[in-house]
Amino acid sequence: MASSFADDKKNVHLSISQVVKDFDGFKAVNDVSLDIYQGEIFALLGASGCGKSTLLRMLAGFEKPTSGDIILDGQSMLDVPPYERPVNMMFQSYALFPHMTVEQNIAFGLKHDNLSRPAIANKVEEVLNLVRMTEYAKRKPHQLSGGQQQRVALARSLAKEPKLLLLDEPMGALDKKLRTQMQLEIVDILEAVEVTCVMVTHDQEEAMTMASRVGIMDQGVIRQVGEPVDVYEHPNSRMTAEFIGSVNIFEGTLSKDESDHAELICDDLTVAIHASHGVVGSLGMPMAYAVRPEKIQIKRRAPDQPCNWAKGTIKDIAYLGSHSIYHVELANEKIVLVSMANSDRWSEVDDGPRLSWEDEVYVYWADDSGVMLNS
Ligand SMILES: Nc1ncnc2c1ncn2[C@@H]1O[C@H](COP(=O)(O)OP(=O)(O)O)[C@@H](O)[C@H]1O
Ligand SMILES: [Mg+2]
């Protein structure tokens, strides 16, 4: 779905402009500007305490920005109280009323909108159908599973047809297996109603699975915005590279900076790092190079390439079913992580026997496998 938000189709629906939230001198949100497109699912991703919920609460109107503006569908929200905003927030705890049935819970929010009884009943039926909970209409929340409660909470949030739906750690209360299933289910529902959604999560898998674009947040600042594949393949800093997935970082000094490639002299390797991506620097300056474990390969013989390899010893092998992680120790004791798919019954390399502990091997990768990073 990420591809449907290509540059030529974007239509800004929500504009967050230079927003700051200062709590007694502490900037929980520090000058965030962000455009959210019509119909997209945007995930704010970051470690606990980085300011995600504070930003979301400002979108909902529960907090007032210290400065900056929030423009939804062309209208500034600054002076619009929460209950008058065309915005709905679904909380992690779902906040369902325990004494009301499923349908009463959903109808409750509609009663203040001066809708007729039949109109309310129709709407309740429509959203229950949407989340496939029609047969549970008469149950109370405690008679539902966690996933079912979440579907009811989502139905209630969508019943008022908000222009913007906010989800704060939506899967927080569910166990791992149910989370994965609900993530896909919620995406289907949100796409069906074409609602614009901003969600908050600290779970990168959740963000990557659900979102059309991800904003990586750190200490009140958005560090990088992009489609999941962009932020994973082309992190713009060490922070984002290390935050998403696992990564090998090599530090060194820039020894070549050409238009199509750059080289880094690196103490960890006897050869240079040669990269075709991501350089803005001057010769001799310290740089880092980030390469993902699944982009590195292992060989028993020295690879036939001038750059991007090192000799090492296998110190650990973590078998994870679909793939294994090899911990290869270089001469200077640096550990390089290599992920290899277990698509063959045994991992054979160079027609030799299966890789094992203490084997002497070479790790190597291609020029376009990683990115140079300034910071
Ligand atoms: N009402 C408040 N008063 C003072 N500090 C707050 C308040 N709300 C949040 N903070 C602080 O702002 C920072 C960001 O909080 P929050 O937005 O909840 O983070 P996240 O949702 O990313 O975990 C934290 O350091 C938190 O302690
Ligand atoms: Mg939070």
Image: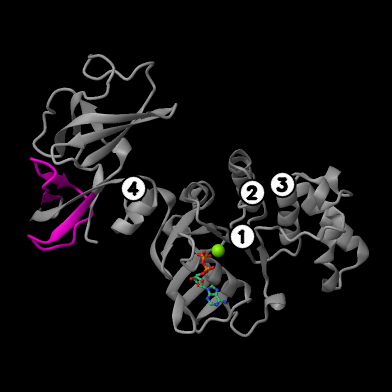
Secondary structure, mark 3, is helix
Chain-order first, disc 1 or disc 3: 3
Circle nearer the viewer, 1 or 4: 1
- In percent of width and height, residue 192 lies at 66, 50
Mark 3 Cα-neighbour bin, 10 Å: few <14, some 14–19, many ≥20: some
Query: How far, Cα to Cα, is label 1 from label 3?
Result: 16 Å
* Dot 1 amino acid type: Leu
Secondary structure, mark 2, is helix
Q: Which mark is residue 146?
A: 3
Chain-order first, disc 2 or disc 4: 2
Q: Is residue 271 above or below residue 86?
A: above
Chain-order first, disc 1 or disc 4: 1
Residue at mark 2 = 186
- Mark 3 in CB contact with mark 4 (< 8 angstroms): no
Residue at mark 1 = 167
Q: Is residue 276 magenta?
A: yes
User: What is the residue that sits farthest to the right in this orientation?
Assistant: 117
Chain-order first, disc 3 or disc 4: 3
- Location of the C terminus by quadrant is bottom left
Mark 1 Cα-neighbour bin, 10 Å: few <14, some 14–19, many ≥20: many
Q: Which mark is residue 233?
A: 4
